[in-house]
Image (cartoon, helix red, strand yellow):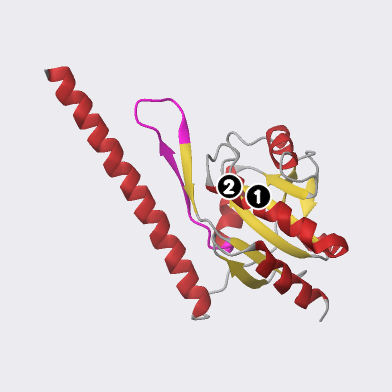
């Protein structure tokens, strides 16, 4: 009987924690969108991180538009869906894709080594650039871009997940914010936006 009550309490705690993280993420996402739309505070900034080949990637030296998404390789749902969309955008852009860096920045540098990121991004598209760094480096980039993320320890397990913002950013070659794309937007609309910028 005591074991049953304990189990029910653990399940209840897990549900409450999960709801808290979901609401928290939703709050930060809505708050960022509101700041952008009100022009109160725009995300942006260049960054220097390690790519999936363990080489330095300096966004300032690329002189390209940037599609940027923050996620992690152990993500069970939203990250794979977004990277499938990013791969579709690259394919739809055709030759214009060479004028855009499609970037995946991990929010889980503890587990996401360059080699793990290499295998992960290549599963979606060979042109996606995967980036990692120290926690301090990732914190700095996330702060510049207004990206919320928080480690969530799974109840009764040694593993953890990471709750994070679910938005694709578009930046110009100067690292300045151009636009953002919410999760449900169609890739064709993002492609149209990028092509309009490229074609002036």
Q: Is residue 71 visible?
A: no
| Residue at mark 1 | 83
Q: Is residue 12 visible?
A: yes
Which picture quadrant has residue 157?
top left
Please tell me which residue lies in front, 141 or 9. Answer: 9
> Residue at coordinates 70% horizontally, 61% vertically from top-left?
67
> Residue at coordinates 65% horizontally, 49% vertically from top-left?
83
> Residue at coordinates 20% horizontally, 31% vertically from top-left?
9
> Would residue 141 be found to the left or right of residue 172 on screen?
left
Q: What stretch of residues is rendered in magenta?
A: 144-160
How far apart are labels 2 and 1 at the CA level? Answer: 6 Å
Residue 15 image label = none
Secondary element under disc 1, as helix, strand or loop, is helix
Secondary element under disc 2, as helix, strand or loop, is helix
Q: Residue 17, percent across and down?
A: 31, 42
Q: State which quarter of the image contains the N terminus.
A: top left
> Would residue 133 be found to the left or right of residue 40 on screen?
right
Q: Residue 111, percent across and down?
A: 59, 33
> Residue at coordinates 48% horizontally, 43% vertically from top-left?
162
Residue 158 part of the magenta-drawn span: yes
- Residue ranking furthest to the left: 1
Q: State which quarter of the image contains the C terminus.
A: bottom right
Residue 79 image label = 2
């Amino acid at each position: 009987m005591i074991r049953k009550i304990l189990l029910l309490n653990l399940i209840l705690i897990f549900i409450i924690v999960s709801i808290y993280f979901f609401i928290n993420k939703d709050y930060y996402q809505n708050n960022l969108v509101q700041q952008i739309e009100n022009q109160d505070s725009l995300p942006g900034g260049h960054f220097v991180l390690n790519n999936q080949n363990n080489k330095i990637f300096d966004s300032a030296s690329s002189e390209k538009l940037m599609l940027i998404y923050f996620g992690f390789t152990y993500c069970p749902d939203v990250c794979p869906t977004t990277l499938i969309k990013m791969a579709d955008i690259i394919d739809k852009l055709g030759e214009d894709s060479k004028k855009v860096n499609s970037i995946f920045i991990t929010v889980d540098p503890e587990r996401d080594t360059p080699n793990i990121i290499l295998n992960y991004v290549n599963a979606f598209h060979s042109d996606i650039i995967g980036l990692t760094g120290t926690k301090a480096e990732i914190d700095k980039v996330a702060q510049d871009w207004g990206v919320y993320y928080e480690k969530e320890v799974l109840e009764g397990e040694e593993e953890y997940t990471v709750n994070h913002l679910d938005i694709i950013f578009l930046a110009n070659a100067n690292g300045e914010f151009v636009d953002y794309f919410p999760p449900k937007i169609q890739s064709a609309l993002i492609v149209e936006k990028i092509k309009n910028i490229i074609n002036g």
